[in-house]
Every structure is written in C-alpha cells, then in structure tokens.
Amino acid sequence: MPTATPLKPIVGQLKRRVARDLVIGLGAGWVTATVYWHYFEKRMQRVDDYYAKHGRASERINLEAFNAMNASAKESQD
C-alpha cells in the first residue's frame, strides 16, 4: 500500500477564482447588454422612421406627446 504524500496547501486559490469569476461575469454581462442596447436603439429608430414616413406616429412618440400634454395640463392647474 502506498504511503500518503502530503498535499500542497491551497493558498489564495479561492480568492483568485472568485475575483476571476466576478470579472468575467460582469464583463460578459456588460458586453452583452451593450450589444443588445445598440441593436434595440437602431431597431426602435427604424420603427419610428417607418411610422413617420407613413404618416403615423409610433407608440413611443405618442407616449412622449401624452406625457408632455399631461405635464402642461398639471402646470395650468397649479
């Protein structure tokens, strides 16, 4: 039967692994969010351009106009 050899102590590996996992996770999340947001903004701009060209406003533009109208109505009541 072989004799047991002493194992090397695990020193600092957990700390390095946690730091690496955090950096990779946060970095990947930031990159993914940036790519998604860039795509989303371009898509919304194309939708707004389409509706502006065809004489109809998109829901986002209507919502902005609705909020502006409500804000001016509240100011006139005060």
Image: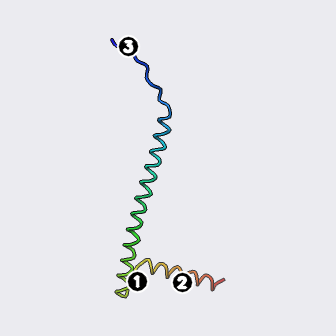
Residue drawn where x is 43% and y is 23% of the image:
7
Q: How many angstroms separate mark 3 from mark 1 (CA)?
A: 80 Å
The percent position of residue 75, horizontal first and vertical second, equals 63, 83
Badge 1 marks a residue whose secondary structure is: loop
Instruction: List the residue tagged with mark 2.
Output: 69
Position above or below: 77 against 38: below
Q: Is the residue under label 2 in contact with that under label 1 (CB below 8 Å)?
A: no
Instruction: Residue type at mark 3: give it.
Output: Thr
Numbered label attached to residue 57? 1
The Cα atoms of the two marked residues, 3 and 2, are separated by 84 Å
Label 3: state its secondary structure. loop
Rendered-image quadrant of the N terminus: top left
Residue 20: x and y, percent? Answer: 45, 44
Residue 64 location, x and y as percent? 49, 79
Lower position in the chain sequence, tag 1 or tag 2: 1
Residue located at (38% from left, 72% from top): 42
Q: Nearer the viewer, mark 3 or mark 2?
A: 3
Residue 3 got which mark?
Answer: 3
Marked residue nearer the N-terminal end (3 or 2) = 3
Residue 44 coordinates in the image, percent (x, y): 39, 74
| Front label number (3 vs 1) | 3
Q: Does dot 2 land on a helix, a strand or a loop?
A: helix
Under mark 2, the amino acid is Met
Is residue 60 toward the left or the right of residue 76 in the image?
left
